[in-house]
Image (cartoon, grey):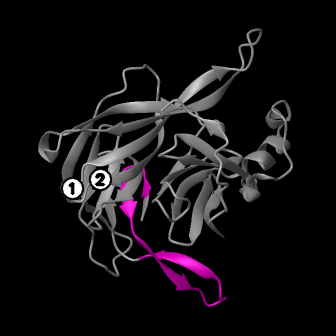
Amino acid sequence: WVAAGGLLRAFGHSRAASGADVLLPIASALHLPQPVHGLGMAAGGQILAVGAGSVMEVEKPSRSMETASVEEATTRLIAHILAVETTGVIATAAAIVATSSSHMIPTLAIAFNSLVAKNTSSLMAEQQSIVKMYGTTNNISAEATLQPLGWFKPSIGLVTAFHACPAGTCAREPVLWAAGEHKLAAIGLTSGMEIATFALPFGNATEVTATKRGEGAEETAWRHDPFRSPVVALAGNASHLMAITSAEGQPPRLFATPHPQLPQESASLFAL
């Protein structure tokens, strides 16, 4: 399942005539009532979509040959999300960390962008994500409102995608994978620790400095370098972690790797 803005689409694996593995749409795209920042699955297999102000259950479409069409999605409100009151803050990624088997009210991680000054003598700033955890103690799904439980700042800068890994799959504790521009971070959700960070192998092309990025052809080459495309989605199964990269002028690409081995001792503590 892949969401882009307010559209949701299911893809299935296929093999092209050339022998290459490809993902092809297997049903009509679904138009959602609001842009989606993240997806998740409830304990019963239902699709949950995290929007700007709520979490929705989305009815799965039937497999169809009409893959070029767009249908209005059938949704059900699961919970409201308490609004962020800071002006100019935008959600860049979201993940459903866990859901209750009885009422499907989730615990969320949402990354919000924040500009951080590089030094006091310069007006230059870089983007840094603040990740907020949301949950509720209200078990009545029709009235549930998810409220902030805590927050932390990952060391990887701006977070563009999340993937939640259940306990016993990636580590003993549940793990939240977060993708940045150059690195991937594994965050322990029980310990509140950043367990490890890994360099993204498709982000190690020759760097172009900030001053050179504005120089005509070099700027164009930098913008269209497929190995510098940001990670727009993370996913995984019992054995592999997957990342989708995409950028303007470049087709999306899917990368997969066996789950990286995580150290037993966490690297740094967050104040969750």
Instruction: Tell me the element at label 1.
Output: strand
Q: Is 222 covered by the magenta stretch?
A: no
Which quadrant holds the N terminus?
A: bottom left
Vertical relation: 139 (above or below) 43:
above
Kind of residue indicated by mark 1: Thr
List x then y, in percent, for residue 71: 27, 63
Residue under the point 37% across and 26% down: 84
Vertical relation: 209 (above or below) 220:
above
The mark lying in front, picked from 2 and 1, is 1
Our reading of the magenta stretch's main secondary structure is strand
Q: Locate residue 218: give its quadrant.
A: top right
Instruction: Tell me the element at label 2.
Output: loop
Residue pointed to by mark 2 = 32
Vertical relation: 94 (above or below) 253:
above
Q: Residue furthest front?
A: 265
Residue pointed to by mark 1 = 75
Vertical relation: 1 (above or below) 3:
below
Kind of residue indicated by mark 2: Leu
Residue under the point 43% across and 19% down: 87
Task: For marks 2 and 1, give the CA distance.
Answer: 8 Å
Residue 161, disc: none
Residue under the point 39% across and 77% down: 26
List x then y, in percent, for residue 194: 61, 42
- Magenta residues (range): 3-25
Nearest to the observer: residue 132 or residue 50: 132
Q: Locate residue 127: give its quadrant.
A: top right
Q: Is 19 covered by the magenta stretch?
A: yes
Mark 1, other Cα within 10 Å: few <14 / some 14–19 / many ≥20: some
C-beta proximity under 8 Å, tags 2 and 1: yes
List x then y, in percent, for residue 258: 64, 70
